[in-house]
Every structure is written in structure tokens, then in C-alpha cells.
């Protein structure tokens, strides 16, 4: 219920955690404005050493905690079993904070609705060739009932999060920990 109320507030033109209707932040276009992902890179499914299934519900992920090792390639199988659109995004807390502003813009421009993604609006030119397309390799946005995969090689030890940055969802607790431990024999920093 808390999540539904937050999303309704956002869609009615309200604000969450100080977000305003005129957000500065980057626009979606082939990278959501993330210049580099120091913690890893996309990989091929054939390179994955294991598969982790993550189920998205309407205010949580199952599982809520994932541990991997630096150098490990993981195939994430993602299923949205909730009634709302959800995102699975691997990053740092700071990356998620910045990305939430971009996701708010998607709502404000009608590209993102509570239970559907308006893919035509995502292609809309926001000026300078920038669009709201959601196509980063470390992130996937799914409508209810949809599934997808992300295959990722974690290159360095880090404390990360996987989160849903749809407005209100992160604040409602839709975030999990992703601990990337050093390879065997490596020292921690």
C-alpha cells in the first residue's frame, strides 16, 4: 500500500524526497549518463559461471542479498511478478540517486506509467539527440509479467546495490545488497 501511495503521488505531480518537477539530471540515451562502470562489464551468457534468479515484487526483490567474487561472471534471470513496472539496476548508492532523477523524468514525460512502459515516448527526442531509452547493460526495466537477463562480469571488489529506481520504489525498500568480494588470494583494501 505504501508503494502504491508513493507512485500515485508521483504520477499526480507530487514529489518524493525533494525531487522537483524540473529535474536537472541526465537524460536517457544509450547510457543514462553513466560514464563508466568501474565495478564490471557486460558479458556473454556462455561465460557465466552461475545463474542467479531475481524475482521483483511490488516492494522487494527475492533474494535481497547477493554475494559474488571479483572476476566472476553471473547470469541474472529477472522476473517481474509484481503489478507495477520495476527495474533491476546494478550500481552504487550514488549512481542510484542520480538515476532516480532520470526515472522521474520518464514519469513526467509519460514514458513510464505505473504498470506499463510507453516505448514510443522513450524514443522521443529531448533535445540534442538525447532520448529516454532505457538501455544500459547493467539495468533492465520490465512491465508486470516480463522477464529478462543481464550477464555481468564483476571486475573488482565493491559494495554495490541492485535497485528499482522507478519513483518511490527505492524509498519503499526495493533495494538489495550486492557484495563483490576479492578473488581468492587477493587482499581486501
Image: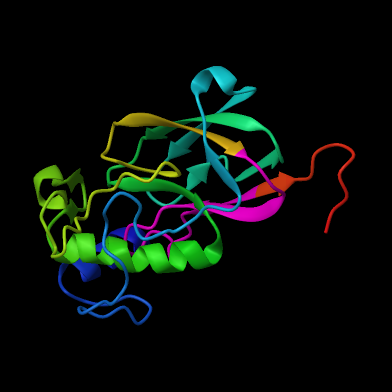
Q: Is residue 128 magenta?
A: no
The quarter of the image holding the C terminus is bottom right
The quarter of the image holding the N terminus is bottom left
At 72% across and 49% down in the image, what residue appears? 157
At 15% across and 70% down in the image, what residue appears? 12
Residue 36 against residue 57 in the figure, above or below: below
The number of numbered discs placed on residues in the rendered structure image is: 0
Residue 182 is situated, as x and y percent measured from the top left of the image, at 79, 45
At 41% across and 53% down in the image, what residue appears? 164
Indicate how the structure is coloured in the image: rainbow
State whether residue 45 appears in this view: yes
Q: Residue furthest front?
A: 128
Is residue 138 left or right of 152 when viewed as pictured?
left
Residue 25 against residue 87 in the figure, above or below: below
Residue 60 against residue 154 in the figure, above or below: below
State whether residue 8 appears in this view: no
Front residue of 109 and 130: 130
Is residue 123 left or right of 146 when viewed as pictured?
left
Residue 97 is situated, as x and y percent measured from the top left of the image, at 44, 68
Is residue 103 left or right of 21 when viewed as pictured?
right
Query: Where does the magenta region start and end?
Result: 154-178
At 52% across and 30% down in the image, what residue appears? 43
Residue 29 against residue 77 in the figure, above or below: below
Residue 17 is situated, as x and y percent measured from the top left of the image, at 38, 78
Residue 128 is situated, as x and y percent measured from the top left of the image, at 16, 64
Front residue of 159 and 125: 125
Q: Is residue 167 magenta?
A: yes
Amino acid at each position: 500500500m505504501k508503494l502504491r501511495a508513493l507512485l500515485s503521488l508521483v504520477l499526480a505531480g507530487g514529489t518524493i524526497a525533494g525531487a522537483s518537477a524540473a529535474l536537472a539530471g541526465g537524460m536517457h540515451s544509450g547510457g543514462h549518463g553513466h560514464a563508466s562502470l568501474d565495478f564490471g562489464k557486460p558479458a556473454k551468457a556462455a561465460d557465466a559461471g552461475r545463474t542467479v534468479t531475481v524475482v521483483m515484487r511490488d516492494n522487494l526483490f527475492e533474494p535481497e542479498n547477493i554475494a559474488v567474487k571479483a572476476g566472476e561472471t553471473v547470469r541474472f534471470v529477472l522476473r517481474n511478478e509484481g503489478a507495477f513496472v520495476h527495474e533491476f539496476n546494478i550500481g552504487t548508492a550514488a549512481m542510484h540517486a542520480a538515476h532516480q532523477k532520470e526515472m522521474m523524468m520518464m514519469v513526467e514525460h509519460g514514458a513510464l506509467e505505473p504498470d506499463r512502459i510507453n516505448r514510443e515516448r522513450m524514443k522521443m527526442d529531448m533535445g540534442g539527440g538525447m532520448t529516454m531509452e532505457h538501455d544500459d547493460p547493467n539495468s533492465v526495466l520490465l512491465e508486470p509479467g516480463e522477464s529478462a537477463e543481464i550477464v555481468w562480469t564483476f571486475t573488482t571488489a565493491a559494495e554495490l546495490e541492485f535497485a528499482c529506481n522507478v519513483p518511490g520504489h527505492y524509498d519503499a525498500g526495493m533495494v538489495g545488497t550486492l557484495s563483490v568480494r576479492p578473488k581468492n588470494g587477493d587482499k581486501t583494501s
